Image: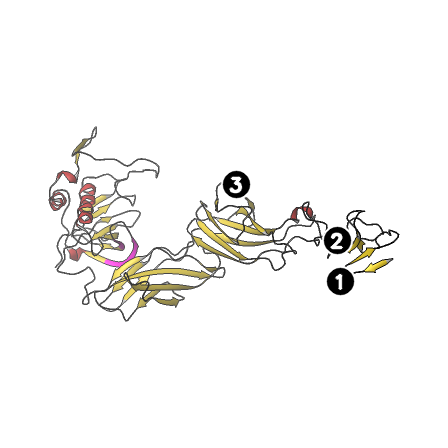
Amino acid sequence: MVRMNDDANSFRLTGQQLACRPGFYKASALDAYCVKCPPYSHSPQDKASECACEKGYYRAELDPRSMACTRPPSAPESPISTINETSVTLEWSPPRDTGGRGDVTYSIHCRKCSEDGRKCGPCGSGPHFVPRQFGLSLPKVQVTDLQAHTNYTFSMEALNGVSDLSPTPRQLVSVNITTSQTVSVILKERKSKDSITLAWQGPERANGAIVEYEVIYYEKNQRDQNYTVLKTKSNIMTVDGLKPGTTYVFRVRARTDGGYGNYGGEIELETSHEDMLAIGDPNQSTILAVSIAGGIVLLVLLVACFVVSGRHCGYIKAKQDPDEEKMQFQHGRVNLPGSRTYIHPHTYEDPNQAVRDFAKEIDVSSIRIERVIGAGEFGEVCSGRLKLPSKREIYVAIKSLKAGYSEQQRRDFLSEASIMGQFDHPNIIRLEGVVTRCE
C-alpha cells in the first residue's frame, strides 16, 4: 500500500516495500518515505537514492541531497569607480541572480592597458587590494599603488559554491579607468572683498569626456554647519557673495561619462578687507623670486621677494635626478673644490640681512603678474613677466608666501632666497633679485 502525505512531497511505503517512482528518491533503503526531488533536480528512473541536477544546475560537495540544485550567480551590476591620483575605489551592486545560494563572494581581475586601450595584460603584483583581491564578502574594494597616467581595466566577478562546477564562461562586469584624473591644484586668479575667482586644470587623462566640474566651498572650520556646491562646464569660476576678510576652503572635482572623480586638494583663500592691488597690500612687504626655466621664470611674493633664473625649474638642483640626494648645507660654511664658499642663511641671526647680502633689490614696477599657475610649499606660484632696466622682458613664474604665514615659514622662505642667491651656473636656478618694498 502507498500512503501519500498531506504535502504531496513524499509518500510512505507500507506492506510490501516498493521502489520510489520517478520524481522521488529515498536516500536509504531503511527510509520509510520516498521524498520528492528538490527544485531543479529529477530522478528519471525508479529506485533513485538521490536526484540528479538539471542541466545548468549543480550540487556542491557539502550540499545535502535534500537541498535544491543551484547555479552560478549572474554578473555584478552598476560598477562605480572613484579615482584618487594613483588609487581607485571600486563599488558595484550584487548580482540580480544569486543562483539560489547565500554564499556569494566577489573577485577582482586587473589588467593594464596601452594608451590606445587595444592591448591589455595582467597587472602583476604591483597593485595592492584592500581588504583583498579575491573572496570579498562586500561589493567594494580599494586598489592602491597603481602607476600614474595609466589605463586599467578592472573586472568584477560574483562567485558562489557551485561556480567552479560550471563549464560556462564566467560572467563579469568591467570598468575602465585612467589614473591621475583628479583636478589639478586650484589656482586663485583674483579676489576682492566679496568674491574670489578660481581656475584649475582638468584631469590629464580623464576617464571619459568631462561633463562638468563641481566646486564645493565653505567658511574655514564651518564645514559641518554650512557649505555650498556649484557646478560649471568651464574650468574657471567666480564665486560671489562672500564675506570680506573671511577665509574660505575650496575643492573641485570633475564629472565624466564614467561618473565623479575625487575632489582635488583643499585650498584656503581669504577675501580682502578692501579691494587690493594686483601685487598685494601696499602696507605689506613683498617677496618675489623669479627663475627662467625653458622660458618660464619663478617669482615669489610677500614678506620679501626674490627672482631666480636657470634651465631647470626647481630649487638648488643641477641636473639632479629625483632619487639623488640634495646638497646639504650645515653649520655655516661648505667649501667646494674650485668653487666659491657657500654660506648657509641659518648662520644669520636676521634672515633679512642674509637676503640683502645675497640678492639684488628689484623695483616692484618691473614685475607684472599675469595669472596663478599653482601652489608651492609657502604659497602660490604665478606666471608673469620681468622687465629690468636695459634688459629684455622675460617670462617668469612667481611664487608667493601665503597669507597668515608663521614666523618660521617667513624665515624658511627668506632662507630659500638667500641660498638661491649664492648660485650662478647655467644649469642651476639663478636668483635675479628680491622685492622687499611695495609702493
- Residue drawn at x 73%, y 56% is 38
The one nearer the camera, 161 or 359, is: 161
* In this rendering, the label closer to the viewer, 1 or 2: 1
Q: Quadrant of the N terminus?
A: bottom right
Q: Residues within 10 Å of mark 2 (few under 14, many from 20)?
A: few
User: Do labels 1 and 2 touch, CB within 8 Å?
Assistant: no
Task: Write the start and end of the magenta stretch as one range.
Answer: 369-382
**Helix, strand or loop under label 2:** loop
Place of residue 407 in the rendered image (x, y in percent of width and height, measured from the top left): 17, 49
Q: Residue furthest right?
A: 16
Q: Quadrant of the C terminus?
A: bottom left
Q: Of the residues shown, which amino acid type is indicated by label 3?
A: Gly
Assign the magenta stretch its main secondary structure: strand
Disc number for residue 55:
2
Q: Of the residues shown, which amino acid type is indicated by label 1?
A: Asp
Earlier-in-chain disc, 3 versus 2: 2
* In this rendering, the label closer to the viewer, 3 or 2: 2
The residue carrying mark 3 is 124
**Helix, strand or loop under label 1:** loop
Q: Residue furthest top?
A: 337
Q: CA distance from mark 1 to mark 2?
A: 27 Å
Place of residue 100 in the rendered image (x, y in percent of width and height, measured from the top left): 65, 56
Q: Determine the image quadrant of residue 278.
A: bottom left
Place of residue 200 in the rendered image (x, y in percent of width and height, measured from the top left): 35, 59
Please say whether residue 371 is one of the residues in the magenta stretch: yes
The residue carrying mark 1 is 7
Earlier-in-chain disc, 1 versus 3: 1
The one nearer the camera, 306 or 254, is: 254
Relative to 21, 202 lies left or right = left
Relative to 3, 189 lies left or right = left
- Residue drawn at x 11%, y 42% is 349
